[in-house]
Amino acid sequence: MQKLTLSLLGAPLLELEGTPVHVDTRKAIALLAYLAITRQPHSRDTLAALLWPDYSQTNARAALRRTISALHRSLGKPLLESRQELLYLPDSTGLQVDAWEFYRCLAECESHPHPASQACPKCLPWLSQAACLHRGTFMAGFSLRDSAEFDDWQFFQSETFRRELGSVLERLVQGYADQGNFETAIDYAQRWLSLDALHEPAHRQLMQLYALSGQRNAALRQYQECVRILDKELGVAPLAETSRLFREIKEQTGPRRAASSLDIPARSPAAAGYQHLQTGTGFYAAAIATQALPRKPHALLLPLTSRETEWKALHQAYAEIERDGQFIVLEGEAGIGKSRLAEEFLASIRPTGASIIQARCYPGETNLAYAPFIEGLSNAISQTVYANWHHSISASSLSEAARLLPAIHQLQTNLPAIPPAEDPGAQARFFENLSLVIRALCEGDTPGVVFLDDVHWADDASLDLLTYFVRRLRGHPLLILVTWRGEDLGSGHRLRRLLAEAQRNDYGELINLARLTPESVRALVGILTSQVPRVTPTITEQLYQETEGLPFFIYEYLASLPESGDNSAPASWPLPHGVRNLLHSRLEQISETGVQLLQTAAAIGRSFDYDTLREASGRTDEETISSLEILMGHGLIREALPGQEKTGPENLRLLSYDFSHEKLRHLVYGETSLARRRLLHLRIAESLVGRIRGRHDQPGFAGQIAYHYKQAGQARPAAEFYQIAGEQARSLYANAEALAHFQTALALGHPHIAQINEAIGDTHILMGNYDSAINSLEAALAQQGTDPAAQARLGHKLGDVYHRLGDWERAEGYFQASAEMLRDGNDPGGLARLYADWSRTVYRRGEMENAWQMACQALALAEEAVDIASLALTHNILGILSRAREDLSAAIIHLAKSLDLAKKIDQPVGQIAALNNLSLSYADMGDLERAIEFASQALTLCAALGDRHREAALHNNLADLYHTAGLEEHSMAHLKQAVIIFAEVNRAGMDEVAAPASELADRSHPEIWKLTEW
């Protein structure tokens, strides 16, 4: 048999006995590559549509026949075989493919007794052979200009092989390094880095290998190259561990041996890749293969069965609500019917006049602060049934709630200005006023309901608001109903703790939904047999065995039955990839317009409104309405707000829709071509921008717009909206979400790099991530240019961070450099604030007199500038120093003045500091009652602000106060909280890599635990 080889890991090459085979058409190579990689038969229609998407079916099949004929003519023999309408590569051809050999080499390593991410000596020859087979990018230089579908498939295959090669090279580097063969390890590390020059683990590995092999200068140059590339491509500094390794090598303390696995997640390339080739379960293979499935239109609604207990529990809990509210949780796995049960319950009480606020949480939206509350409350406010809800709420409360719900301004004009986000107690007031809105909307003769679906996907800010609201149900006749997936919430999750607290206080209940039993499925089929002709009793047993009683699966199986003909259960009822093929069978009945609407809706990524859907899809009103009705008739789309009329354009804008299941959205989106996805995301972003033009303060919108611009490949506008989203999140105290937005803006190339790095640094400070804060602020300082005021401001912030860490020498260094810049300018207020903070550091070094002189100088400058913020800060430090000098009367005078000034300008940072120091002073005087009162006020403000380090210190101070007062239970509660937060702050930034305990000890900051006054 003649030797026939196909090389795809690099430029594609077909050879017969070592001689290249030249084929008349590129489509022949594409066809051969697709069949070789997927390793499964494909219908002629599927292959013709893939390679000639613009041809009619007849012309495409004719072109396929010509291409196969040209391929066989070039080889001088048949290569492909057909079985009925299917084409495939038979094993008897003797064809050798480098991709097959690549995965076979990896599979040889699977039998060795160690994790798949590691390499033993026996692995190295096989891994080396796999690396040699990979000559370059998958099908390098090859493309089909008239087939975007094939190009998409080729792109994803290329990415898969690139990741597999990266894993191979990483294991080779580690394996040869463990043997002391640093020269070979360095060669493979250089090749690993060439795959992605921005991959810092590869840079660190190379630095370590150079150092271990005695090439110290090469290691230092590698770090410089890493810095250059990261700055040029991303505008960011290296990670802390990379810089630390550089310092170790530079100071000749020596690098530690590389860990067996760095930042690439461990996986099994042989198991996954080889199975991919053998079974053809690749993404596009599955997607294209299912296009030949028969079209079966169905619309089926299963009755609720075997939910009598849960149904009774829901209605009983609701009926017992008189004065105090109830918190009910429906828990169960995905597809168990939680949402269906809740919606049926809401439908049953809606005729009684119950007011209902409902929303759903979505995966991938954990960085969108308050997203479900914005959705639910905005929808409720827009409904005419709630027209007079706002009359019972004061204008100031409405103004505060309008921070999250700008639509309130349309209901009541001339509202007072929104208070600053830094106002004392702002978060608590913000939550309370939102609670007033919710209660007003739910007010009526029967208790109202707030329903949050899939709350396990809620963002942290929403969970904060939900926790606040649930804890204050006493005295409010209201039902809070939520659903969550039990498998997605660990035993210590905050939602479980909230439920446990509610249960202990007798206003919470958990309702677990189990899978249906065989008897329940039999009863369900019995009901449907008399109502739906296609359902017969003969399918009962197999239906249960195939679905194991999962309601969503039962629905899909029953909906797949034919409308007529043989309705017995099929002998083999396949379920490849969960319900993928069943969802395909339902999608195939949809027209081209319907598919385009589904693709647009999937790109929106969550429940979607009519306007955005129509504008982004490019369809007319008539087309959009008609297609939506068809999609809802087939059970693919549902109205998210049942009961609203669909007449008139003004009412269309009130309607919201959603997919019937999240898996359906994932399927539609995944099978939309990359080019179309980008176009849809761009249209969605532009539609949202047009809707809020000139109103960028709209909560939630900026994050959505940024996401869609990013997915559209529009980095510049995406970066700008991520910055806006970050500022919005920070104003709402959602620091984690703000940080994520700022970091994304930076990665996308925001033009104002220094500004973004400074915002990231500020957020890291509040969260206690001091190493990260230093990196970001130093980057901002380096990027700021020659502006002395900006440099002084950033230097001041860096000095404050080092003060928090107890590194007095570095703190003073930054304070001194910043002071020199400010002395040359005309900013006595800024210089006063700097001297005040500097004096605090000098005081901590034990130089009391120098600290006092500097604080007095700061006060003189602040008075000269008539700067209230500077005066508040300087009186605070004078109060600290007076207390240290045991002049408690003077301390209290200074601190009381500091507090008044900070309140005057609504500055929470200054108020927290003054309240804490007043508490310490009154404790020294023996007035524990006032001391506890001031410390508690400070803690409330600090928790709202999100300054984790100072929050821990306040818990610790309160623990001491309660201990002195003999209230040990209160003392221990605060002490536990202090220890937890102190430990988080001390470890912040240290667990980014797996470091030995000794190294973590070296990097710890003991001064963090000693903070009591500031």
Image (tube, rainbow, N blue to C red):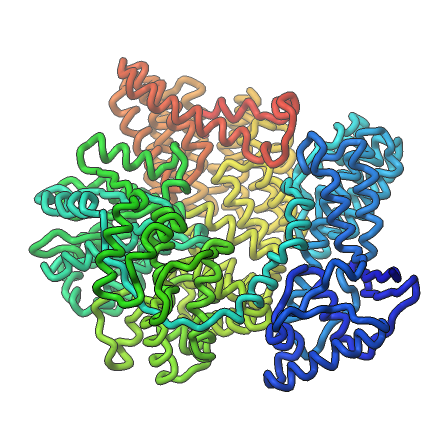
Between 901 and 920, the one nearer to me in the picture? 920
Residue 40 visible in image:
yes
- Say which quadrant the C terminus sits in: top left
Q: Residue at x 77, y 68 (%)?
A: 79
Rendered location of residue 599, percent (x, y): 47, 70
Q: Which of the 4 image quarters holds residue 63?
A: bottom right
- Say which quadrant the N terminus sits in: bottom right
Rendered location of residue 921, percent (x, y): 35, 22
Q: Residue at x 21, y 63 (%)?
A: 530
Is 687 drawn above or below residue 843 in the view shown? below
Left or right, residue 943 beside residue 304: right
Rendered location of residue 590, percent (x, y): 43, 75
Between 280 and 321, the one nearer to me in the picture? 280
Q: Residue at x 73, y 49 (%)?
A: 103
Q: Which of the 4 image quarters holds residue 626?
A: bottom left
Between 307 and 246, the one nearer to me in the picture? 307
Is 820 drawn above or below residue 298 in the view shown? above
Rendered location of residue 26, percent (x, y): 77, 75
Left or right, residue 676 beside residue 505: right
Q: Residue at x 67, y 55 (%)?
A: 277
